[in-house]
Image (cartoon, grey):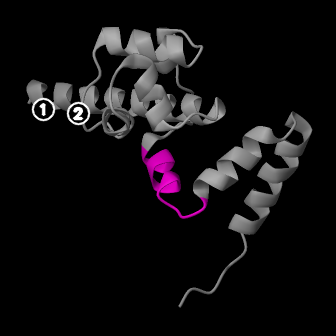
Amino acid sequence: MPGKRLDELALSIDKGIGARIRQRRMEMRMSQGKVGALIGVTFQQIQKFENATNRISASALARIAEGLDATPAFFFDRPETADPDVIERFAAIPGASDIAQAYLAMPPDARVIYEKTGELLANIPWQRD
């Protein structure tokens, strides 16, 4: 059914834009409330944009882009490896914000070490209870 596929595509795009808003906001070390105040909406509305609960209008995206020192196109250009579901699952982990902020504060050389350490730890056959 073409309509259903279009709805799924739209939701995928909305999730990608929301993930990029969140990513950029965290890079800029801004709260949802601060971004909301910049564009005249509540932090709850920013949260809904980031979670793709509410669709963002072009004008709101332009205001967010300006507030986050980005272009509107930035929010559409996502790397193929940026999976919104992975970003959502990571963001739900207690302490994820601290990990992300520490990562963003690192110089590029340290990030490579951090990434490789993470890959090594992920491949250890951990026992789960």
Residue sitting nearer the eye, 65 or 14: 65
* Inter-mark Cα distance, 2 to 1: 6 Å
Residue 15, percent across and down? 36, 34
- Which residue is the extreme one toward the right? 109
Quadrant in the picture for residue 43: top left
Residue placed under numbered mark 1 in the picture: 4
> At 27% across and 28% down in the image, what residue appears?
9
SS assignment for the magenta stretch, majority: helix
- Identify the residue at horizontal 50%, vertical 35% (top origin): 22
Judging from the image, what secondary structure is the residue with disc 1 in?
Answer: helix
Q: Which residues are magenta?
A: 85-95
Q: Amino acid at mark 2?
A: Glu
The reply to whether discs 2 and 1 touch (Cβ–Cβ < 8 Å) is yes
Q: In the image, which disc is placed on residue 24? A: none
Residue 27: image quadrant is top right
The crowding category of the residue bearing disc 1, from other C-alpha atoms within 10 Å (few below 14, some 14 to 19, many at least 20), is few
> Considering only vertical position in the picture, is 34 above or below 39?
below
Q: Is residue 80 visible?
A: no
Where is residue 37 drawn, in percent x and y? 42, 25
Numbered circle sitting on residue 8: 2
* Residue depicted at 41% across the width and 9% down the height: 62
**Callout 1 amino acid:** Lys
Q: Is residue 100 above or below residue 63?
A: below
Q: Nearer the viewer, residue 76 or 51?
A: 51
Any part of residue 10 in sight: yes
